[in-house]
Image: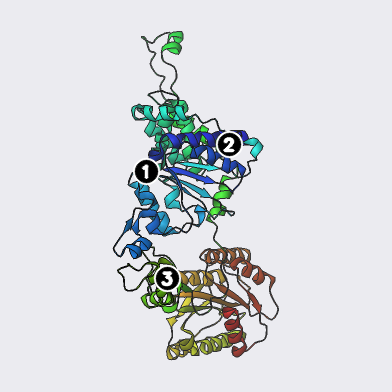
Amino acid sequence: MDPVERWAQAATAAALLAIDPEGLGGLWLRARSGPARDRLLAGLRGLLTAPRRMPPGIADAQLFGGVDLAATLSAGQLVRAPGLLGSGPVALIAPMAERMTPGLAARLAQTLDASQGHCLIALDEGAEPDERLAASLADRLALHIDLDGLALADCPPPAFDAEEIARARTYLPHVRLGPDAHAALTVAALRLGIDSLRAPLLAARAARALAALDGRDTADEDDLVTATELVLAPRATRFPEEDTDEAEPPQDAPEPPPETDAAPEDELDETDPPQRLPEEILLQAAKAVLPPDLLARLAAAKAPKTAKSGAGAGAAKKGNRRGRPLPSRPGRIDGQSRIDLVATLRAAAPWQTIRRKLTPDAPQKVLVRSEDIRLRRFEEKSDRLLIFAVDASGSAALARLAEAKGAVELMLAEAYARRDHVALIAFRGTGADLLLPPTRSLVQTKRRLAALPGGGGTPLAAGLRASLDLAALSKGRGLSPTIALLTDGRANIALDGTANRPAAAEDARAMARALRAQATPSIVIDMGNRPQAQLRDLAGDLAAPYIPMPRADSQRLSTAVTAALDS
């Protein structure tokens, strides 16, 4: 789609939102700040009822209503503020919507579901494909527009007519859809890979708004096509496949009987025109506006962020309920934070004389202002789990297995001070075994490691898959897993158990990418006599540090792992 058509589509979306803001939910406008976005917003602001800008760090009390702390402190009695959304239908404009917290996005989604007349214009300024508006909120906004790459020369001032929009609003309640419109939109959404039923419903609302804009009381085929382009096409997750299952008549089927009372051919052409499938028309319209790199964009949006190496002593998490207390900080009451009463009174104390002189009639004994408020903070750390995935194959077992055992024991000896747990997975033969479940027991570890067998092939992919499963399980139990892979990198057993060196290497890299997708920190220790380029590539797939240690004892191995994890 060329820039002129994209801008015309954006202008149409803005007009539809102005006609039916509650029914369409809102507009997801993905574009960096620039003249094209500013021009569209300037035109849209003039059409919407009560547009309000929502600051990115707005508190719940300011948005949804709550206690007005400053007024309460001044008046000496509870004073509630209505909030931005508490004073009638509002068109909320949210800049930097890609940074919206999941909690705020969920509460806004609930507000849109309540049908109180609000709508949302989410300004998504994400630079990367994975920096996007929360899915729960994007699903409720009918119109998705992308203005990235448009120059101001491609964007003439939109010809919005306020009177025409107002007239369309009066038409809208009387506009109806055809009998097959909902079914056609639903089938089109299904074939585009859209799994939300909101999408065809929102497309139907958009079609009705288009008909109202033209002053018609019935939405026609062109309205459905435009609604498909605006609502369904941006949500597509796949290209619709061509319908190739046309039934072929059997070769030995009898000839159909001649129709004696059939109408002449010319008469048929005039009275019964061939009916086209509405969903096929809608799909063709959607395919015309789908970007050619749709699949690449979807893959990039779903790509995981790079796994961070090292994990210190477990992942730290800021909170306001549990954990180690941190110094209080000034802040606003947002309905979730807790006030540090002592710190608040301590902040207010030096100002009591001045405030008493300014307000001698104030009934309060202690004059507290909103700037005195201090909020409590805590930091909670989860325990770390070190998963040792050790190559116990014939090529590595005899030389290095004893060193791996010693390193595990040395690290576990320090576990009580570091709050670490240790697990051991050995891969050899055709598979991998969990020899030591997560534990902090040194006695149990020594007993199990004494029976660690060795020999056979190198099923590296199986070892990584077992590590992946254990890491996912430990995350569910509140642990922060880190994987230490000890191997010489000579993978020769594929995941299916066959001896196939190329397939084994490819399977290992696939499992490494899966581990990276889970953002599980890892380190790779090359135990071979010479550094292996294949193992270095595997570390790249894991986004993990690569440490070649051709001749090291258990003490050096333990020290290297500890240094890598704490870096």
> Three-letter amino acid code at disc 1?
Pro
What's the distance in space between the residues labelled 3 and 1, CA to CA?
34 Å
- Colour scheme employed for the rendering of this structure: rainbow
- In the rendered structure, which disc, 2 or 3, sits on the residue that comes first in sequence? 2
Quarter in which the C terminus is drawn: bottom right
| Residue placed most toward the observer, 362 or 96 | 362
| Residue placed most toward the observer, 168 or 292 | 168
Question: Compared to 198, does 528 lie above or below?
Answer: below
Disc 1: CA contacts within 10 A as few (<14), some (14-19) or many (>=20): some
Q: Which mark is residue 89?
A: 1
Query: What is the secondary structure assignment of the residue under circle 1?
Result: loop
Question: Compared to 213, does 443 lie above or below?
Answer: below
Q: Which mark is residue 372?
A: 3
Query: What is the secondary structure assignment of the residue under circle 3?
Result: helix
Residue 75 lies in quadrant: bottom left
Most distant residue in the right direction: 530
Disc 3: CA contacts within 10 A as few (<14), some (14-19) or many (>=20): some
> Which residue is identified by label 2?
6
Which label sits in the foreground, 2 or 1?
A: 1
Question: Compared to 115, does 364 lie above or below?
Answer: below
What's the distance in space between the residues labelled 2 and 1, CA to CA?
29 Å
Question: Compared to 349, does 247 lie above or below?
Answer: above
- In the rendered structure, which disc, 3 or 1, sits on the residue that comes first in sequence? 1
What's the distance in space between the residues labelled 2 and 3, CA to CA?
50 Å
| Residue placed most toward the observer, 547 or 244 | 547
Which label sits in the foreground, 2 or 3?
A: 3
> Do callouts 2 and 1 mark residues in contact (Cβ within 8 Å)?
no
Disc 2: CA contacts within 10 A as few (<14), some (14-19) or many (>=20): some
